[in-house]
Amino acid sequence: MDETIDHRNWFQRNWKWAVPTGGCLLIIILFIAFAGTMIMGVTSLFSDSDPYKEGVARAQSNQAVTAALGTPVETYGMTKGSINYKNGDGHTNLEIPIKGPNGKGILMVVADKYTETWEYSVMEVIVNDTGEKISLLEDTEALDEW
């Protein structure tokens, strides 16, 4: 019974497949971490903007929106759109998914900034179930006329 005992450790016996597999896993993990960081950065850029905050606040306080979606109205999912700043001016075009206990909708916000304040050309909620469009600009326009 002459048996030779292999005294090498696990890595010494398996390095030919362990090194390439470990390298591939490392690349995949780094890619996922990079993508996650980019998504979080873009999401925070949108949610920290004044048009986003103003649109969400108006949607949450609008009686027609709360009647259609229920209370509380809150955001969910990924915001789509763009925000551009150049020399103090800005333009934004956002689609913010919102929901309530009774349904879901999309908050559309289109605004331009030429001075220190944003001027909204579109701010409306589109209810998913009915397709109803609820304007959030009418309330402020009526108040401005007084």
Image: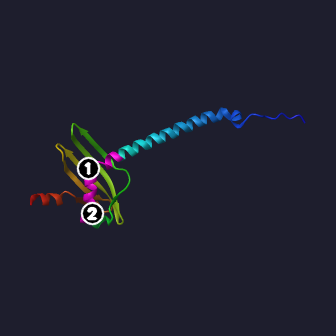
User: Residue furthest toward the front?
Assistant: 116
- The quarter of the picture where the N terminus appears is top right
Residue beneath disc 1:
50
Residue beneath disc 2:
65
127 vs 120, nearest the viewer: 120
Magenta region includes residue 49: yes
**Regarding mark 2 in the picture, which secondary structure is present there?**
helix
Q: Which residues are magenta?
A: 44-64
Q: Image point 54% across, 37% down: which residue? A: 26
Disc assigned to residue 126 = none
Magenta region includes residue 86: no
Could you tell whether 78 is left or right of 135 in the image?
Answer: right
Q: Image point 28% across, 65% down: which residue? A: 66
Disc on the earlier residue, 2 or 1: 1
**Depicted 92 relative to depicted 12: above or below:** below
**Regarding mark 1 in the picture, which secondary structure is present there?**
helix
Tell me whether circle 2 and circle 1 mark residues in contact (CB < 8 Å). no
**Depicted 73 relative to depicted 31: above or below:** below
Q: Amino acid at mark 1?
A: Asp
Q: Image point 24% across, 66% down: which residue? A: 63
- Residue 80: percent from left, percent from top: 33, 48
Q: CA distance from mark 2 to mark 1?
A: 20 Å
Task: Judge depth for marks 2 and 1 and give the one in front.
Answer: 1
- Residue 21: percent from left, percent from top: 60, 36
Quarter where residue 67 is shown? bottom left
38 vs 79, nearest the viewer: 38
- Residue 34: percent from left, percent from top: 45, 39
